[in-house]
Structure formats: structure tokens, C-alpha cells
Image (cartoon, rainbow, N blue to C red):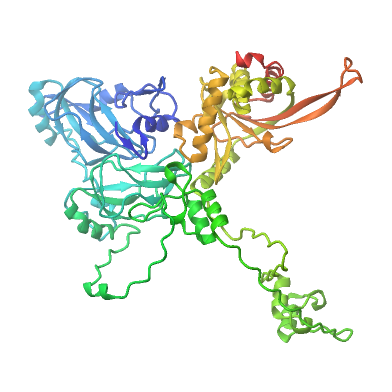
Amino acid sequence: MKIIAGISSTTALLFLLSWQTSQPTTAFVAKSTAHGLQKHAASFFPTNVDIYENVRFSTALKAESIKITMPALSSTMKEGRVVSWLKSEGDAIEAGEAIMVVESDKADMDVEAFEDGYLAKIITGEGETAEVGAVVALVATEEADIAAVAAGDEGGDAAPTPSAEAVPAADAPAGGAAPDFEFSQLDMPALSSTMKEGKVVSWLKGEGDSVEAGEAIMVVESDKADMDVEAFEDGYIAAIITGEGETANVGAPVALIAANEADIPALKAYAATLSGAPTPAAPAPAAATTAPKAVPKAASPASVNASAGGRVVASPLAKKMATEMGVDISAVVGSGPGGRITAADVQNAAAGGTPAKKAAPASPSKPKHIPAPGVIAATPTARALAKKAKLDLASIEGTGEFGRVTADDVRIATGEKKPVRKTAAPGAPAPIEMPEGLVPFTGMQRAVSNNMVATLDCPVFRASREIEMDAFNALYQSVKPKGVTVSALLAKAVAKAIEKHPIINSSFRPEGTFFNKDINIAMAVAIEGGLITPVLKYANERDVLELGENWKELVGKAKAGTLSPDEYNSGTFVISNMGMFGVSQFDAILPAGMGGILAVAGTQEYIVPDKQAVLGMKKISKMTVTLTCDHRQIYGADAAMFLKTLNDIMMNPAPLVK
């Protein structure tokens, strides 16, 4: 399988099927396993019986043949592109054997034959596109019938005509016909199940550069993380349609790749007819070279982040902060993955390299004028504005000469104008600059916002309980030197409680309650610019030491923005822990598609009666947890019994480390 969108096709397959219900895999789906898990296709695929009844037909020469149609490899796929045929016309094929590679809207996948036979005719060639369900090839059941099947599509149940070129002219706006030579179109990929649009963070290749299949050519910001996008064919970057910092919908063209370098100028002209592409400028005349050159600036410190073309790999927030703080981002050394510049790098550069501004000298105080009793000094405009706004001039402090009320003073009093900040006195601390104005959402923030709105359709209830933590805390102190974190130990305890109450691990379906076989604990983690939920898979079965190591790895990937889709969207139950912030109690919002989420607050100390104590009192630690459930399939008694079991486990936690 090929690598596409910065992830392997195996990982992409896991991601594609992570939200789909389990059904028997059809013959059209490449059977694949990963990490020992058998993945299944979604229910929208046809069964083998359906395929058999719809693809067999007889030609005019009575030769029986089988249609190979374009399969639906994802729930959003409308058409597919034949990347390559693994068999040629006349070759024998066997059931289960891969015969072609199809590029869907998610990834490249092998398509297998579902019956034995001979490939009689290829209708959709390599590089061509066909709609889902369209016939792409004909298979003869007998070798002697190959010629008859290949010729038999002219009458009767004829196969569809071949689809358009790799980038059909119909997709282009009116007025721009696709060039008549080989080229490919790079579209905005879907990097997650919730992604609707992507932002081009940076182009790793410039126009005119050569690219190879599998080579990273751009970095895209999705609603989850920044990911490299790789080329799927060799060629040359002819035209970049979506520039750095610009956004495009999933599936929209972002660049054109020419197969031959000589075709680059023609593709640039064609790109100008596509949405958002500027018309290529004519080359400057040679005489322009005689213009005086600008004086070069002093060389800045060498940066590992600037490529040969002058491009800098940095997070969107880092670029925004560098612009606002006046920092030359090309001189900043990045500390992120692959030398990527982060917001913290920009802040450090600004703190260490920007000289403090000198405080402006205090303005001389204005002479005071005390008007006669009952007289309010104000300009005529100020009086008119105050009368219109129905304000008492006596309540407005004047800033004009001799304390006169000005028009700006009235506008400030009405809120029409913001007051001018006073200059700090010499030696006084500088005022704190607070953020102001609209800051657009990042892709992750927009995804979180949309997911929160989606929760409004779910009827929920909440149940809280105090849990004694002395035994759990003692156990944690004993395993902490081995690298076990509180999160890993807590996930293990919750997973063991779920084993006894599987309804808590379920999710709602219109047809009934869907029970998840695996117990995968998703733990909410706050990262720069958003929130994500790395998943500890099979938490009830794994050792706490293994869970601790896995959790540290997941948190590191989350902060670096390198989590794979399967590592953050495969959870079956969610834990939101804010105990480390000293929160005494809170409610968590139930994510869409989940049955329950547990809000974990901080540990607090209490004095309680104890007959065995010297003074009849003792000190204990308690923690408040709140369970939010989907009330459509989980009831109050279910939640209460789950919390009781969790309390018993936390008070006797020794089995968690066995």
C-alpha cells in the first residue's frame, strides 16, 4: 500500500473504519489487520450475494462475464481514481487476489477480486477516475471467452464509458479546459473523520521543484494536528493554487503536478482558471535588472528552520505571535519536531533579543482651573453630545485645558470611544497588555466547538460520589518510582470497574444499545490551542507499568501534534481529570457518540470521627468524581452501582498492580 496524507495506508484504513459499525467484509474490501485487530467494513458495502446478482451478465455471444465496479472505500467517497492495475488484460485472477490500487478520498487501497476468472477488458485506465458503482473492468469466467467479453460491451448490458482524465475538465470552472497532456491534481486531503477544511501551514516544495512519490510536499493544519502531505506521483510542482496560510475545503485542488517539466507553463495558465489561483505574472524585462538594489540587511543568526527557498516551518500561532511581537521568525531556532518553531520559541526570542522600551517621560500636569460654582466647563460639541446622550456633564471628568470637558470625554463616557491609557510613571511596572479583538479559531478549536454543539442533542444525567483516597495514594507512591503516573493508575481502576458494569462502556444507536467489546480509556489532555483525548487501549487487560509508559508516549505525541487518528478517536469511555489544578468538583460534557465521561476533581483532606483514634478523630483524603451518562441507554441505578464499584476498587487498589 502507498503512503498518503502523511500516514501509512494501513493507519489510514484503521482511521477510516474507526467510526463505522461492524459488518462482514465484502469481497471488494482489502482484508487487513493491524495490531492484531481484525477491521470490518461499514454497512453501506453490498454483500457478496448482491454483487453476484448485479455484476454477472451475458454478452451478445453468450459468453458469461463479471463486472468489476468502483468500490466505496469510505462513507464519504463519491468517486475513485485508479492508481494502478496490478493485472493486465488476459491475465488470470483468483478470488481474494489484489487486482488494482484505488485512490479514494481518504487513502490508497488495494481492491481484490471476488471470483476466479480472466481479466478481459480494462475500462477505466490508470490515472482515470470513475464514480462509485461504475464499471471499471470486465472479467471472463473462461479463458476462451476473453475476446467475446471484451467485444460484448457494445450491446445489451453495456459497461459505462471510461471516466474522465485524472483531473477532468468538468471539474474546472467555465472558461478553462484541462490541458491535453499528462498531469495530476493534488487535492486537500481529509486527515480526520471530522475535518471539513484544511489550512496550508507551509509548502515544502516550490513551483518548478521536482517531487517524487512518497515525498512530503506540504504541511496541512487539520482540526486535530499538523501533518505532512506526501506526493503520490513523480513530477514537477507546476502551480500552487492554495498558498501558505490559506484554507481550502477537503477535496478542493491545492496544486497541480506536471509529469513533464516542459508542461509547467501551460499548467500555470490552466491553474489561473481554477478557484483562487492568481493569473501568472509575465516575466520582468531584462532592463529591470539595472534598477538599484536594496541595501542588504545584516545577516541574522543561522536558523535550522529556513529551507533553501527561504520557507520557515513554524506553527500558525508562532507565525502570528512573531508578526505581532516584531520578531524575525527566520532567525528563531525551533524546538519542535523536526526543528519546527513553536509559540514558546517566539516568546523566548522576544524576551532575550528585544530591548525593553524606554518609558516615555511623564507629561507635565495641566494647570487647574476652578470654574465658578454651578458652571461646568465644556466645549459646545461636548454639550451637544452630552445632551443627545442624556448625560450629566457634571458626572464627566474633563481632560481639556483647565479641566474642560471635551467631545472625546463624552464619547468615552458613552462607550463610543476607548479611553487613552495613561503612561506609567518612571520606575512603575509597565501595564499588562491584554489581548483584544477577534482571533480566528484554529482547526482544532473549531472542531472542539462543533463537537460541543453536537452534544446538545443528547439527554444526559449526572451522578457524583466522594471516594476515600488514602489507600490509592499509598499505592501510587509505591509505584511512582517505576514510572507509573496517576493517569495510568486511574485508567486501570476505571477499566476494572467497567468490566463489572459493561453498560457504562456502551453507546446509543437508533436501533438499540451498542456494547463495545474493548475497554479503551480516553483521557482529556489540554494542549496549546485546543483539547485532545489520547486513548489507552485495552486498559483493563494491560499491566499498569505498560500503561504508564504508553501514557507518557501519548502525551508527548499530543503536545507535538503527531498523534495518529487511531490514537485519539478509538476511545469507548472518557476521563477528564482536573485534580492537579485544585478543582474541588466539576461536571464534564459528554462527547457525542460516548456513553459516559468521568470528571475527576482534586483530593481534599477531611477530619472524621474515629473511635480507635486517641482523640476520637482522624484525617482522611477524599476525592469527588462526577459521572455524566447518556440517559437513552444508561439509567441512574447503573451509574450509582458503577460509582460504588469504583469506590471499592479505589479503597482496596492492591489488585491493580498484580
Q: Residue at x 18, y 35 (%)?
A: 159
Query: Which quadrant of the view contains residue 124?
Result: top left
Using the image, determine if residue 380 lies above or below residue 128: below
> x, y (%) of residue 68?
22, 30
Residue 539 visible in rendering? no
> x, y (%) of residue 380?
73, 86
Residue 285 visible in rendering? yes
> x, y (%) of residue 486?
63, 27
Image quadrant occupied by the C terminus: top right
Q: Residue at x 80, y 84 (%)?
A: 377
Task: Out of 512 and 393, give the one closest to the viewer.
Answer: 393
Image quadrant occupied by the N terminus: top left
Task: Out of 412 and 428, give the one closest to the viewer.
Answer: 428
Using the image, determine if residue 334 lies above or below residue 554: below
Count all numbered tags in the image, as a single digit: 0
Determine whether, in the image, residue 306 is placed left or right of residue 180.
right
> x, y (%) of residue 98?
24, 26
Q: Residue at x 66, y 20 (%)?
A: 478
